[in-house]
Image (spheres, rainbow, N blue to C red):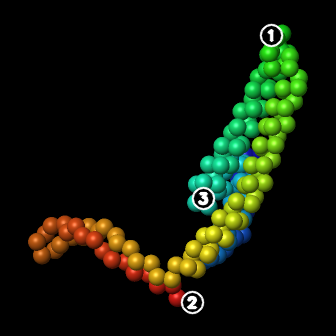
């Protein structure tokens, strides 16, 4: 399964061209969706730069895995001959199984929708950003006094259409 996932990721990275910021946003959507669906755990959202979506999907999938872990742990203790309190209450076990399944599938749907919405938000943010002015700390050699000069540089970027 790991080799198959790795092959899919390499294929997606090789096929999608990345040349401008808008194409990069578009390319990262496909990769994010594939990585959110196959291995899951919010990996695609993290790679896309969306920490909120990544942590949301990570938390949901970990809780679903935790619920299934509790059910399987109780099930195997019951098979081993140790009475399990959880397995004695079949209705509660059924509710846990349905809840875990619902959380898991909801996180997969979220992992499909969130990268698209995040990319659309990022694209509009890039379009609104015509001029960016930022101050950058810089360290440069001062050849006249043979020392390092510490200063602040001004960076101005213009978006050309």
Q: Secondary structure at mark 3?
A: loop
State the residue position of label 3: 50
Q: Secondary structure at mark 1?
A: loop
Q: Is residue 144 left or right of residue 71?
A: left
Asked if disc 1 and disc 3 are in contact, CB closer than 8 Å, the reply is no
Residue 78 visible (yes or no): yes
Tell me what residue is drawn at x 69 percent, y 62 percent: 115
Q: Mark 2 or mark 3, which is nearer the start of the sequence?
A: 3
Corner quadrant of residue 143? bottom left
Whole-angstrom CA distance, mark 3 to mark 2, is: 27 Å
Residue 132 in the image: x percent, y percent?
Answer: 45, 78
Residue 121 in the image: x percent, y percent?
Answer: 63, 69
State the residue position of label 1: 82
Q: Is residue 55 left or right of residue 132?
A: right
Residue 14 visible (yes or no): no
Structural crowding at the residue carrying mark 2, measured as other residues with C-alpha within 10 Å and reported as few (<14), some (14–19) or many (≥20): few
Give whichever of 87, 3 is nearer the camera.
87
Q: Which mark is residue 161?
A: 2
Residue 92 in the image: x percent, y percent?
Answer: 84, 26
């Amino acid at each position: 399964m790991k080799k198959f996932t790795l092959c899919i990721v390499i294929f997606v990275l090789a096929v999608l061209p990345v040349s401008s910021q808008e194409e990069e946003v578009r390319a990262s959507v496909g990769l994010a969706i594939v990585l959110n669906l196959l291995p899951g755990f919010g990996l695609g959202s993290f790679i896309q730069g969306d920490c909120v979506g990544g942590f949301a999907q990570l938390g949901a999938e970990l809780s679903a895995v935790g619920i299934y872990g509790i059910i399987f742990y109780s099930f195997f203790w019951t098979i081993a001959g140790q009475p399990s309190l959880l397995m004695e209450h079949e209705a509660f076990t059924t509710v846990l199984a349905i809840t875990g399944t619902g959380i898991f599938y909801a996180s997969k749907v979220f992992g499909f929708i969130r990268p698209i919405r995040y990319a659309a938000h990022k694209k509009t943010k890039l379009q609104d950003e015509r001029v960016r002015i930022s101050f950058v700390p810089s360290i440069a050699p001062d050849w006249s006094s043979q020392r390092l000069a510490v200063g602040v540089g001004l960076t101005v970027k213009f978006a050309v259409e």
